[in-house]
Image (cartoon, rainbow, N blue to C red):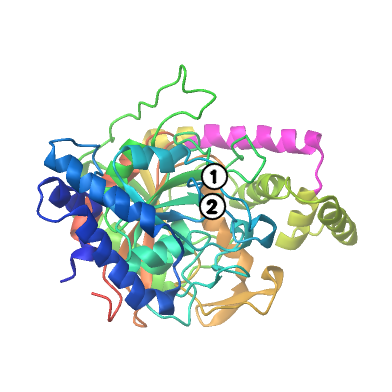
Amino acid sequence: MTDIAYLPAHELARMIRDRQIGALELLDHLLARVERHNPTINAVVTFDLERARARARDADAALGRGELWGPFHGLPMTVKEAFDVEGLVTSWGSPLFKDNVARETQGVARKLVDAGAIVYGKTNVPVRLTDWQTFNPLFGTTNNPYDPSRAPGGSSGGAAAALASGMTPLEVGSDIGGSIRNPAHFCGVCGHKPSYGALPQEGHWLPGAHADPDINVVGPMARTVADLERALEVMGGANRFDRVAWRLELPPPRASRLRDFRVAVMLEDRCCEVDRSIQDRIQAVADRLARAGAKVDDRARPAIDTREGFALFVQLLRGVTTSVLTEDEHLAFRQEAERFSMDDDSYAARGARAAVQSHREWFAANEARNEMRLRWGEFFRDFDVLLCPVAASPAYPHDQERPRPARRIEVNGHEIDYNHQIFWAGFFGVSYLPGTVIPMGLTDRGLPVGLQIVGPYLEDRTTLALGALLEGELDGFTPPPGFA
């Protein structure tokens, strides 16, 4: 990697502090890459260049006076389009919100700015963040830098593509059904889905909303685990309602050497088939851990039926995502639910019923979820982490013609339901567990493959610690051909 744009965010921040490069100089360098690569990738879709250049000049001048704004002083970066930045539109990729101009920079975006970062633009998302592809009628399609004919994942697809193409050193994503983890896997970068509640979500609410959605989290994306760790330190904390009294004090990692970790491995599940190109790489990581002296078990599982856990996730997820429907949309889901028989347990049937579930049904599902959380707590008494896939396959070709319920993807030479891949995000996310994704190299087709490291609730530093150690053992981030 010869381009300075591919240096880790924390290294670039250090270089700015040490006056080895100016904040304005780095910003202009990144913008030159945007001019060169963005027409093909279409990752950065909103710009704030005048204010960014002014702030970069101020950052350089402040250093000249001996002032330091914070750990990301003068670092140019982008954020996902769904985060509020003062004066910029937050549309969530939907024409309904195309005129929704943010009145203030809030939440984690505010924390990063207060730590010295310079937000020069925002990255693309699918409509209302509800897809593992990234396209919408306002900004068009984002392409995967490793193969522009393929999707970069979603919903933080623009964020991951911008990182992989060297247009930003740091990003902020959100994740309710894999929206940080999936694009990190597709684009060969790192992402951390925090424990639910560890980071404030204000500034990532739909217009008019004031409550954190269930299951959803916001979190950092980068090209190294060290950058995830530093960003998490800055971004973590209570939401606006709780911060008067609550403080985030994540415990230290359970281990600091590979040989001291107790590792469970889950390569596949009946809920979602996984391509061998992914399984083989995870197995290779597990074998490497065993050789390093770690306790590795490929049969250990929590006392949870995965089908029941997956169904519970779909029910609670749809309870969140359909809560903002219009009356007409809600009526359409009710009519759709009535067409399915009660014994139909397909993804479409479960989703339709969950969209119109009663509060009593949701409350019962929430009780079942908390029972699952207890089972996970018991499991993590014996194991520190669980290694598993992020999705069913590497990045797949764009598919915008078929509606999402009708899409199929290729796994192990045959097609499976596109929607089944959410299992690898939802089975863990519904119980609020943290998950760190790191790259494990490229397939024979040159497509990235990511590893998901799941850990105990609020023990985010444990998954990050193992990710950092494995990053040193594996190839780490590999720039797409023609970008380095």
Q: Which residue is mark 1?
A: 204
Badge 1 amino acid: His
Residue shown at 81% from the left, 47% from the top: 356
Which residue carries the number 2 mark? 82
Is 312 left, or right, of 105 in this rendering? right
**Secondary-structure class at tag 1:** loop
Left or right of 378, for residue 119: left
**Among numbered discs 2 and 1, the one appearing first in the sequence:** 2
Task: Tell me the quadrant of the picture where the C terminus can be found.
Answer: bottom left
Residue 113 place in picture, x, y as percent? 35, 42
**Which residue is at the front of the view, 439 or 255?**
439
Residue 296: x percent and y percent? 31, 50
Q: Magenta stretch: give its range.
A: 356-376
Give how far across and how far down residue 83 sits, in percent.
Answer: 50, 48
Residues under numbered marks 2 and 1 in contact, where contact means CB atoms less than 8 Å apart:
yes
Q: Is residue 42 visible?
A: yes
Majority secondary structure of magenta residues = helix
Sort mark 2 into few (<14), some (14-19) or many (20+) by Cα contacts within 10 Å: many
Residue at 67% from the left image edge and 40% from the top image edge: 208
Which residue, as the protein is rendered here, is positioned at the far top? 245
